[in-house]
Image (tube, rainbow, N blue to C red):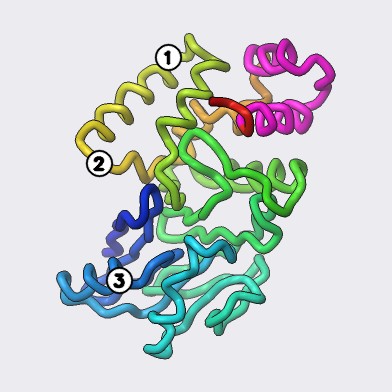
Amino acid sequence: MLKIICLPIFTDNYIWLMQKENQVIAVDPGAAEPLQAWLAEQQCQLAAILITHHHHDHTDGLPTLAQAGLPIYGPAGIAHVNHVLHGGETLHLFDEAFQVIATPGHTLDHLSYFGAGALFCGDTLFAGGCGRLFEGTHEQLFQSLQRLAALPADTLVCCTHEYTLSNLRFALVLEPALPALIQRQAIESEKRSRNLPTLPSTIALELATNPYLRVHDEALFARVKAHTPSIQTELDCFTALRKWKDSFR
């Protein structure tokens, strides 16, 4: 049985861990020391690493962790990645098949990993939100999110940042009377009051409450059009939403 664990690091990052018996695969180790301490405490061994993209808060643990000669999977151009992926591959890890999905937008090299009922999506899809654009286009990020939204509804969404409450605050400006969103905000606020993670989410929950996956909804579209009258298409709506959130405080 594969166990999925989120290990907090920095202010709001998580390293995701997949554990089978005493073997562990880590996703986006932005720091080595907290992971090494957890492995020692749990008497586990690191078997492999998955990297979603090149940003330092997802990769800074690699110089230390790579000394063990582990398989490190990720995009090209990242130091210590020794199994380069581009999207479209299938990895077999812990007797599970993981699809490698190219999800450009936040960065051009961004990859997501789907398998064992879980999606490790880095900074592409967040709980209640999505990543900022650093390198890609709005259309690329929109298409990446559409690919992830088409995964099974019960898929666990394992993103890398604890941004949920901030994202839901923006979502509630857009859909203040949406029952699922109101309920989610209360549930996630209670978790954070006890310093618990709001993650993982699910694809079903994101489809019900995440505005970036709801641009087809007529009421939401109308709300965004009132803010940005020029929008005509769902991609326009998404673009306007992402730009709006960039300046939202």
Residue at 38 percent across and 67 percent down: it is 31
Q: Which residues are magenta?
A: 219-245
- The dot on residue 179 is 1
Judge whether 64 appears above or below 115 on screen.
Answer: below
Look at the magenta stretch and give its main secondary structure: helix
The picture quadrant where one finds residue 38 is bottom left
How far is mark 3 from mark 1, CA to CA? 41 Å
Judge whether 69 appears above or below 45 on screen.
Answer: below
Evaluate if marks 3 and 1 touch, with contact meaning CB atoms under 8 Å apart.
no
Looking at the rendered structure, the number of numbered marks drawn on it comes to: 3
Label 3, residues with CA under 10 Å away: few <14, some 14-19, many ≥20: some
Of the two numbered discs 1 and 2 in the rendering, the one whose residue sits closer to the viewer: 2
Residue placed under numbered mark 3 in the picture: 33
What secondary structure is marked by label 1? helix
The picture quadrant where one finds residue 75 is bottom right
Residue 157 location in percent, x, y? 44, 47
Residue at 66 percent across and 13 percent down: it is 223
Residue 228 location in percent, x, y? 76, 18
Label 1, residues with CA under 10 Å away: few <14, some 14-19, many ≥20: few
Label 2, residues with CA under 10 Å away: few <14, some 14-19, many ≥20: few
Residue at 37 percent across and 24 percent down: it is 185
Disc 1 or 2, which lies upstream in sequence? 1
Residue placed under numbered mark 2 in the picture: 196
The amino acid type, in three-letter code, at marker 2 is Leu
Q: Is residue 43 left or right of residue 20?
A: left
Disc 3 or 1, which lies upstream in sequence? 3
How far is mark 2 from mark 3, CA to CA? 21 Å
What secondary structure is marked by label 3? helix
Task: Depth check: give the residue in front, 111 or 192.
Answer: 192
Residue at 31 percent across and 27 percent down: it is 189
Evaluate if marks 2 and 3 touch, with contact meaning CB atoms under 8 Å apart.
no
Residue 181 location in percent, x, y? 44, 21
